[in-house]
């Protein structure tokens, strides 16, 4: 079976993690699957290789009409049995079945773009939902959203849970790891991690900081609030004076090994999102052995399970009290670290790859059967 995979969507986001980790796992030991990985030569995939994988350079930019024409030509030339787009934008008019992965339906639930762009994005999602032979969803929650919002029949959707990258582990990668964190990022002995993001409204960063302000008042403990990620979210919340008492430390983007180390030594990770299609940062923190306090919105409860403390995203007091307990009690931190690691072990890229390949075989078999009728 020859499968084309559109790896042009590789970047530093969650979609980029999905592209790299899924391809790596699918290459491991697969003899009955040939992957033709279409990539932008200016942005090649890192450390993805295997006897079943062939890289194909594609020059057409994403979102372009030229890309539509190029993939139509390539799919015939390369004699593809299937084409998999890891993002909602999929080429139209291919001679083979198309599988699309949908990570979330945030544009239908929150105004995250200017009006015109939001409308175009919705059109793209609807086109993919209509034309894809099958849709892979990261979570049951996203699968249900696809049925409710885009009216995709349940039989055309398969949930495949993703996982954290291997860098996120409870095992320290070097001697004096915490000392290096202190030197590089100026973190103290007690800190709580929060995430900034471009779509900061859905991440509820403001709710996280309000909870931490209350925790600081209640506990009397001098801790730092370490904010990682793009500056958009934290910048949108006003001057640092508004968050007096939180001792903010802004790191910006972090390499995965550094973020994993930051999680390993944190007293907690707080992410009270209003919606998640999966919630990969939560799983990354749990995989690193960090106690997690999060929300019950979107897919978060599905992913967190019993591995995190879960609250309504508006429950400032409840989240503050959970943080106070983690700051004050080493026993509480050990208990929630163990729970986090137990839950994180339920997710793996090996399983995600096997389930994705199962979808490939099912769709291919259906296509062959339909042609023979």
Image (cartoon, rainbow, N blue to C red):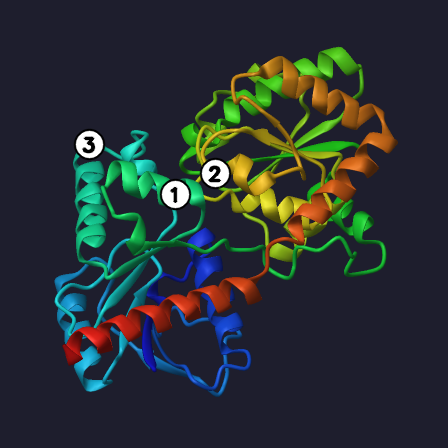
Q: Secondary structure at mark 2?
A: loop
Q: Residues within 10 Å of mark 3 (few under 14, many from 20)?
A: few
Label 2 sits on residue: 299
Residue position marked by numbered label 1 in the rendering: 142
Give the quarter of the image for residue 194. top right
Nearer-N-terminus badge (2/3): 3
Query: What is the C-alpha distance between the residues marked 2 and 3?
Result: 26 Å
Foreground disc of the pair 3, 1: 1
Q: Label 1's element?
A: helix
Q: Residue at x 22, y 54 (%)?
A: 128
- The residue lying at 31 percent from left, 48 percent from top is 154
Mark 2 and mark 1: Cα distance apart in space: 7 Å
Residue 13 at least partly seen: no
List the residue tagged with mark 3: 115
Mark 3 lies on a secondary structure that is helix
Are discs 2 and 3 less than 8 Å apart at CB?
A: no
Query: In this view of the protein, can residue 164 be seen by the observer?
Result: yes
- Alpha-carbon distance for marks 3 and 1? 23 Å
Mark 2 / mark 1, whichever is N-terminal: 1
Taking 302 as reference, is 123 left or right? left
Above or below, comparing residue 287 to residue 80 in the picture: above
> Looking at this view, is 145 or 279 the one in front?
145
Q: Choose between 4 and 175: the one closer to the eye.
A: 4
Looking at the image, residue 318 lies above or below residue 149: above
Q: Residues within 10 Å of mark 1 (few under 14, many from 20)?
A: many
Q: Total of numbered circles in the picture?
A: 3
Q: Quadrant of the C terminus?
A: bottom left
Are there few (<14), some (14-19), or many (20+) residues within 10 Å of tag 2?
many
Q: Do the numbered discs 2 and 1 sit on residues whose CB atoms are within 8 Å?
A: yes
In x, y percent, where is residue 99? 29, 63
């Amino acid at each position: 079976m020859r499968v084309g995979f559109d790896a042009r969507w590789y970047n530093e986001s969650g979609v980029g993690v999905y592209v790299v980790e899924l391809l790596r796992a699918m290459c491991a030991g697969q003899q009955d699957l040939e992957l033709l990985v279409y990539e932008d030569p200016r942005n090649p995939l890192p450390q993805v290789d295997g006897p079943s994988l062939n890289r194909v350079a594609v020059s057409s930019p994403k979102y372009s009409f030229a890309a539509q024409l190029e993939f139509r030509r390539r799919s015939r030339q390369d004699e593809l049995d299937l084409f998999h787009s890891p993002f909602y934008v999929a080429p139209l008019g291919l001679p083979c079945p198309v599988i699309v992965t949908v990570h979330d339906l945030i544009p239908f639930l929150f105004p995250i773009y200017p009006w015109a762009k939001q409308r175009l994005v919705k059109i793209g999602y609807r086109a993919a939902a209509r034309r894809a032979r099958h849709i892979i969803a990261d979570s049951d929650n996203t699968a249900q959203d696809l049925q409710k919002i885009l009216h995709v029949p349940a039989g055309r959707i398969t949930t495949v849970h993703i996982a954290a990258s291997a860098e996120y582990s409870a095992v320290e990668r070097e001697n004096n790891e915490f000392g290096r964190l202190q030197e590089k990022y100026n973190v103290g002995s007690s800190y709580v991690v929060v995430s900034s993001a471009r779509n900061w409204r859905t991440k509820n960063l403001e709710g996280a900081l309000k909870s931490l302000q209350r925790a600081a008042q209640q506990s009397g403990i001098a801790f730092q609030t370490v904010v990682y990620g793009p500056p958009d979210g934290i910048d949108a919340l006003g001057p640092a004076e508004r968050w007096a008492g939180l001792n903010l430390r802004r790191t910006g983007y972090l390499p995965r090994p550094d973020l994993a180390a930051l999680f390993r030594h944190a007293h907690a990770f707080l992410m009270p999102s209003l919606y998640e299609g999966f919630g990969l940062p939560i799983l990354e923190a749990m995989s690193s052995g960090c106690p997690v306090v999060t929300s019950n919105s979107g897919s978060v409860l599905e992913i967190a399970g019993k591995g995190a403390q879960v609250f309504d995203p508006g429950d400032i007091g409840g989240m503050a009290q959970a943080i106070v307990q983690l700051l004050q009690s080493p026993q509480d931190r050990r208990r929630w670290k163990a729970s986090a690691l137990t839950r994180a072990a339920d997710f793996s890229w090996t399983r995600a790859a096997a389930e994705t390949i199962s979808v490939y075989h099912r769709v291919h078999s259906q296509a062959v059967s339909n042609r023979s009728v």
